[in-house]
Amino acid sequence: MEDLFGHSYPSTSKNLYADIILPVPIPRAFTYSVSPEIQDEIGIGYRVMVQFGKKRILTGIVAKVHQKAPEAYKAKPVLDLLDDYPIVNALQIKFWGWIAGYYCCHIGEVMNAALPSGLKLSTESKVQIHPDFDLENPNFPMDDRELAILEVLEKNQEMNVDQLEPLVVAKDLHKIIKSLLAKKAILVYESVKEKYSPKTETRVRFSPEYLLESNKLNGLFEKIKGKEKQENVLLKYLQQVPVFNNQELNEKGLSKKVLTDAGCSPSSIETLVKNKVFESFKVKISRFDPIKIDERPIELSQDQMEAYESIQHEFGNKSTVLLHGITGSGKTEIYIRLINDVLDSGSQVLLLLPEIALTTHLVSRLQKVFGDKMGIFHSRYSDNERVDVWQGVLSGKYNFIIGVRSSLFLPFDSLGLVIVDEEHEPSYKQFDPAPRFHARDAAIMLAWLHQAKTVLGTATPAFESFYNAQNGKYGYVKMDKRYGGAELPHFHLADILKDKKKNLLKLDFTRLMREKIQEALNNQEQVLIFQNRRGYAPYISCEECGWIPECEHCDVSLTYHQYQNELRCHYCGFKEKVPNKCQACGSEKITTVGSGTERIEENLSLLFPEARILRMDLDTTRSKYGYQKILEEFGSGNVDILVGTQMITKGLDFDMVSLVGIVDADRILFYPDFRSGERAFQQITQVAGRAGRRNKTGNVIVQTRRPDQLIFKEIIEGKYTEFYRQEMGDRRQFFYPPFVKNIKIVVKHKDFKITETAASQLKNLLSDIDGRKIILGPEKALIGKIKNLFHFEIWIKLERSSQAQEHFKHEMSHKISALQGDKRFRSVRFLVDVDPS
Ligand code: ADP
Ligand code: ZN
Ligand code: ZN
């Protein structure tokens, strides 16, 4: 018996306790006693069933086994041990604990996020008639509704509580069950069921007796002579499984599907099984198609070799290295080298990507190198697919995983390297629900727990990462040339206002942009057009009085979607038909204002009627393979122009793209957030990096109303460091990260006054916490109401020292619990976001 820290205990001990992580919003694990029967088996990472509160039975995970009885309460016993082996390891539980502590949430919430639901057990209450109960002759009078339920239960052995719901009004069901329980008419119990089911296939093989005596097999053909269909099955089987040469081959058999695909009749296979010639059996198979490895090794260029060696060198005394390589510098091949090194040494590797569907190029390159050894963890995988990857890591089938942020939770036990590609991507931060973790930062922590190394790769580092590289916390390796000497694209600024004055702005496009698009089309090159807003128009408005339709549930204007002729809220999903009259003044003069991707697509088709145009945004990629279809279509060369939101800024690598157009750069720049400059630099550089990647220099057109701004000059000249220095000056002066740590608390409730009061009381409580800090707010959030809940925000700026942070977070949790204990605020939600994006 070992606990989390490796202390061991004699297994004969009498008083053993287990701390259990339960899926409830409670900030700690609970201690239960372990009965002697399971003392030898129980350990960290096993699932158990325990009673929680008076009635509930929950499944949880053992975090620790020890001999210390809880002081405040008498420990209840662990009811049942569910596994023969632990489903999570001690490192994972440490990692969960770190996430819960750092991001101020409950470890049960982390567990919920970490386990694929196929591994979570669902406890469903079952109901049956009490064995001693006699419906004809009850001891107590029953009312109609009780009788109705009893009659149904009479006919069925057992039922789930939710199956009874149709019989009575749902809210009364609980009461009725309670009353029936009291009258000893029924029994209620929990049954546990595994949700995960592995994918299997049915196979057939010769029954053993046919192999033991060789003439029996020959006799068989005599016996079925003339039965062509059965003969066919036997011949096809022997073709694939030549048991005459090697009897052991029969063991694995042949999938029934292979036989039927080869033209065998299913009923003849069945007949052979029935006559005991064949036996049929099931085997577990992978849900993923096999992949061929392309052995062609790639030589690193001189620059890549130098970068690779520098990383190795930096690993000598730093555990994290920032690989700052411009777009097209060839970071992928360097990753491949590093990954191979670690796999050869027998350790595991995790490569994190912001979004797998968008990085098809990178994924297929890695698949060619690593084939089936590489597991992919997709955000759109079904639950069964997730469990398969999880089991693959456990069994050692996958030593290398590429995946989205949730792949941090897979059951690794010996990571040697974690790579975070596009580490600057804001989508690495999970916003809702808790844990609100940042996958890059959590990855560094995970690597640290495994004593592994981390590489952060990007062309445009997050300021936090660059700051850590500058002050020596991270190693730093720079690559500032494109692979093969390809040139960076040429930038052109196009002045929207100037063109407008001269009447040269047509359907959102300046003359320069139109000319360059035409040129690309003439040369049969592809074009990417970037607009960071989906839908047709950001809003519609009355020309007479200026009325703008807003969402009934949120403080935002409704976006016009032309295709469905609808107004939609992008925050809550509310939709309504477009009104034909102004609802304020009755005027029929309603116009659309501004342009989203849908309108840009339409405008392009008006300007370039001969061009084939495709759009990629949230609306066109909702299905599981939505992205893939669009990217394949574009990659096949059947499309001239791809219009899209920031989705198109990520790792696309298409040879034929020679032009990238940014319709409205000001929308990216003038966003009310201290990070807007950093984000604009990253986004514009990344989207520009999609242009002209191989032998031809690409062009980038940036449309703006303010071409004089310094940031454009710096993006164009690739002056990341200069830009960083200026912005850091401001951040230092006004106390922004990375000079402080931010915590944002959002207070939500359906009543405005209650929200405001709770928020200001929380602020007062937080101000009392000792230590240096700045607390801003409470203030109505930028969008003050979402889904009928009012939003107030409090921002806290803390010293960077981890001691100061821990102290504050600890006190803060207490203060929030205290407020939630107040009757008035019982239904107020306090949402804590550490390092908000
Ligand atoms: P990054 O991720 O740094 O933007 P990539 O890794 O996508 O760059 O590489 C850019 C292009 O150069 C890709 O098309 C890739 O196939 C090619 N490339 C990179 N390194 C090599 C190499 N050593 N040999 C051949 N082609 C390479
Ligand atoms: Zn009006
Ligand atoms: Zn809404």
Image: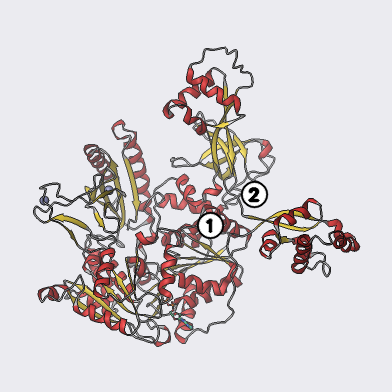
The image quadrant of residue 647 is: bottom left
Image quadrant in which you'd find residue 467? bottom left
The response on whether ligand 1 sits within 8 Å of label 2 is no
Q: Residues at badges 1 and 2 in contact (C-beta under 8 Å)?
A: no
Task: Give the image location of residue 440, x and y in percent.
Answer: 42, 62
Residue at point 57%, 46% (across, down)? 195
The residue under the point 48% across, 22% down is 176
Label 1 residue near ligand 1, CB within 8 Å: no
Alpha carbon distance from label 1 to label 2: 16 Å
Residue drawn at (59%, 64%) of the image: 398
Task: Please indicate whether residue 373 sits to the left or right of residue 247 in the image.
Answer: left
Q: Which amino acid does label 1 sit on?
A: Leu
**What residue did someone put label 2 on?**
85
| Label 2 secondary element | loop
User: Which residue matches tag 1?
Assistant: 410
Q: Where is residue 379 in the image (x, y as percent from the top left)?
A: 46, 58
Q: Relative to residue 568, is residue 714 depicted above or below?
A: below
Circle 1 packing at 10 Å, graded few (<14), some (14-19), many (20+), is many
Q: Where in the figure is residue 391, as x and y percent of width and height?
A: 60, 56
Decide which of tag 1 and tag 2 comes sooner along the chain: 2
What is the quadrant of residue 256 in the picture?
bottom right
Task: Name the residue nearer the viewer: 786 or 795.
Answer: 786
**Left or right: 395 as drawn, with respect to 379:** right
Q: Which mark is residue 208?
A: none
Element at label 1: loop
Asked whether the viewer can see residue 96, the reply is yes
Q: Which colour scheme is used?
A: secondary structure
Label 2: few (<14), some (14–19) or many (≥20) C-alpha neighbours in 10 Å = few
The quarter of the rendered structure image containing the C terminus is bottom left
- Can residue 777 be spotted in the picture? no
- 745 in relation to 732, above or below: above
In the image, residue 371 above or below residue 286 = below
